[in-house]
Every structure is written in structure tokens, then in C-alpha cells.
Image (spheres, rainbow, N blue to C red):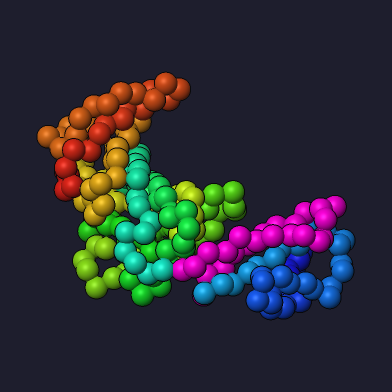
Amino acid sequence: LIQPTQAGMKNLGSTKSDAQGKFSFDNNDESGPRLIQAIFEGVQYNKMVARGMPSTGVQIPVYPATTKAGTAKETQHFIVLQPGDKEMTVSEGLLYVGDPNVTYYDPVNGSVRFYVPAEVKGPIGVTVNPAGGMPIPRPALKTKDPNIYKIDYPIHPGETRFDLNYTIPTTSPMIFSDKEIHPEASSNLVVPNGVTAKSDDLELAGTEPKTQASIYRIKNASFK
């Protein structure tokens, strides 16, 4: 049982559930919001209890954990390019859908793996956006495979989006090469209004109504 404060997270107590999953805390401090963290089979689940909410009958759904590959599937992948004078900013979004009955968690190989171009300079930012939860920063961890990184984060039932951000140097002509390691996902490349992307690996799919950004469908797993 944790209480968020200006000084950080204050631990109000810990307990274990019984065989039926029931649990209780001796701490009755209801002066502010509280966060219940439940750990089951090595995976953490969170439940925020706002001020004024009942402190009895609180339920936290938990699920069996599995390392079986393919349990969670990447369904959408979009790449947004923002060219600049000295560098190009790249933002990627990976949308995963978890199995409705289990949590996929592979801390060794990474629950999520992704490719970044070899030209990347500087850090790779990763933000996890769980369904109905707060954004969570996570490090991009190198793997033994060139340009392949992994994210150590469990994929719960429902949708989870992983946002990536990095930069590559500007060249003339400006060339961007990437690779899809989950070709079954629907993949799109987006460039701002006034920028044109040319490639045999792309197909213009339309424009975004508000910004007039061009949206291209990525046709091949490796594209340039």
C-alpha cells in the first residue's frame, strides 16, 4: 500500500493475500490517494484508490504469466519523421494487444523487441502507455543482434502502446532506412506537410485531415 507524496512514494504497508486472493492492510490512513501494488508470478499490477473511494471490496485483476512467444501481438506500427537542419527526429509507436487470459512477460529476451537504424545518435527514449494507466519510462536495452533493442515490461491483457524517440543526422539527400521485425503488423510512415517521401517500398495512403501530414503504407519488411 503506497501513498504518493511530494517527497516521493511513501510505503504504508505490505501484506500477502490468502488462498482465495483476499487481502487487507492494517493502515487506515485515508487522507489522500493510495496506490495498491500487487505482485503475482513476478508481474506487478497497480490499482489507484482515490480519496473518498471505499477502502473495502477493492479488487485488482491479476493473470498467470507466460514467456511463450506470440502470446502478445504487435498490431500497429507507425513512424513519424520530422526533418531538421542538423538532425531528423524519429517517433515510433508500437501497439500491442495482449492475450485476454494471461500476461506475457519475458525478462530475458524482452517482451518487446524493435529495430532502430544504425545511424541513430544519442539515447533512445521509450515510454510505455498501458491501458487506463499512467505513462511509464523504460530503458531501451541492447540485444546480441545488431540494431535490435528490447523492452523489459510485461504486456497485460488489453492494449499497450510503446512510444520510441530518437534522432539521426541530417544528410543530403535525406535517407531513412528501417526494418520491420513484426511484418504482420499494419505499418505506416508519416511525414509533415511540405515533405515528400519517395520509395518503391512505400505507397501513399492519404493525408491527416488536421495537419495535412502525408501517410504512407509500408509495403516491405525492409524499406528505404
Residue 129 appears left or right of 165: right
Residue 196 appears left or right of 161: left
Does 166 sit above or below residue 214? Answer: below
Residue 40 appears left or right of 147: right
Between residue 73 and residue 205, name the one nearer to us.
73
Residue 221 location (% of width, % of height): 18, 47
Task: Please indicate, yes or no, whether residue 141 appears anywhere in the rendered image.
Answer: no
Task: Assign the C terminus to one quadrant of the image.
Answer: top left
Task: Please give the name of the residue rendered at 31% of the width and 64% of the height, measured from the top-left corner.
Answer: 69
Task: Please give the name of the residue rendered at 67% of the width and 71% of the height, measured from the top-left corner.
Answer: 20
Residue 51 appears left or right of 126: right
Task: Please indicate, yes or no, whether residue 136 appears anywhere in the rendered image.
Answer: yes
Residue 204 location (% of width, % of height): 23, 27
Residue 140 location (% of width, % of height): 39, 64
Task: Please give the name of the residue rendered at 74% of the width and 60% of the height, measured from the top-left corner.
Answer: 58
Q: Main secondary structure of the magenta part?
A: loop
Between residue 7 and residue 70, name the one nearer to us.
70
Residue 175 location (% of width, % of height): 19, 43
Which portion, as a residue range, is magenta?
A: 42-65
Between residue 125 and residue 61, name the one nearer to us.
61
Task: Assign the N terminus to one quadrant of the image.
Answer: bottom right
Does 1 sit above or below residue 98? Answer: below
Question: To which quarter of the image does residue 62 belong?
Answer: bottom right
Magenta segment includes 151? no
